[in-house]
Amino acid sequence: MELAILKIIQMLLVAEPAVVTAIHNLMTGTGTADDLAVLKADTIAWQAIADKAQDEIAKVRPPVVQLPLPITTTGV
Amino acid sequence: MNIKRSIRVLLVAISIATVSVPNIGCIKGSATHKVTVGQHTLREAVGAFQDVEIAEFNKRFIPANVHLRIQSTIQKIALAGVDLDTAVASGATAIDAKAKFDAIYTLLDSLNTDGVLGIKNPTTKQALEVALDGIRAIVDNILVGVK
């Protein structure tokens, strides 16, 4: 856990201003394709958080297994 | 380094990062500036909260049903973040973004009432409350700026 915290701190201290600049440009109507690409990477990071949460949910709530239907011996 | 100290250090780092983000052309303190910087730091803070919660669950300090509720809400917050990015990419105004942040704030409230309050271990509960307060402070700062 300490390692994860230190990694986040390191990431923040060398925080890439690219995402901040891209969002600013897009919100002020001066965005380019490059800004959209940077924002796309940010969206992927949000999606990664959602996916990680889904993995945790699956760990404590395994997916429901569909049982096969019983075979009837009497014809219809 | 204990968990509370780790979270405090993280929150200080987030604050430093927020302040140290270079001026990108808009007026510092303006609605756009706050939304721009806030959106970025919010993702880092939510990710950090998620990592701490998973670590505490793996140490058996959080029951499975509470872990399920917390991670379900984190998932909703992350998808709201995706929604915010999509809105920004399609030219959202600061006011549009505020509506998205309002939705995220509501989810943060439910993260507390449906999740953190149900934790019995006092150390774990306090650690997550500190982390959650840090996230709320980021959103509060944004909402004050765009009202």
Image: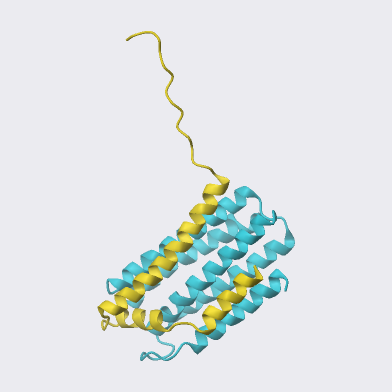
Q: How many marks?
A: 0
Indicate the quadrant where residue A17 lies: bottom left
| Snapshot colouring | by chain
**In x, y percent, where is residue B101?**
43, 69
Q: In this rendering, would A17 be left or right of B121?
A: left
Q: In this rendering, would A19 be left or right of A62?
A: left
Q: Which residue is more in the foreground, A6 or A29?
A: A6
Residue B64 lies, with reference to residue B8, above or below; the image says: above
- Residue located 54% across and 58% down the image: B110
Quarter of the image with the C terminus of chain A is top left
Indicate the quadrant where residue B82 lies: bottom left
Q: Which of the chains is yellow? A: A
**In x, y percent, where is residue A4?**
60, 70
**Farthest top residue in view:** A74
Indicate the quadrant where residue B2 lies: bottom right
Quarter of the image with the N terminus of chain A is bottom right
**In x, y percent, where is residue B59?**
69, 57
- Residue located 44% across and 81% down the image: B37
**In x, y percent, where is residue A22?**
34, 80
- Residue located 29% across and 79% down the image: A34
Q: Is residue B31 visible?
A: no
Residue A74 lies, with reference to residue B103, above or below; the image says: above
Q: Which residue is more in the foreground, B116 or B64?
A: B64
Q: Which of the chains is cyan? A: B
Residue B9 lies, with reference to residue A47, above or below; the image says: below
Q: Is residue A30 visible?
A: yes
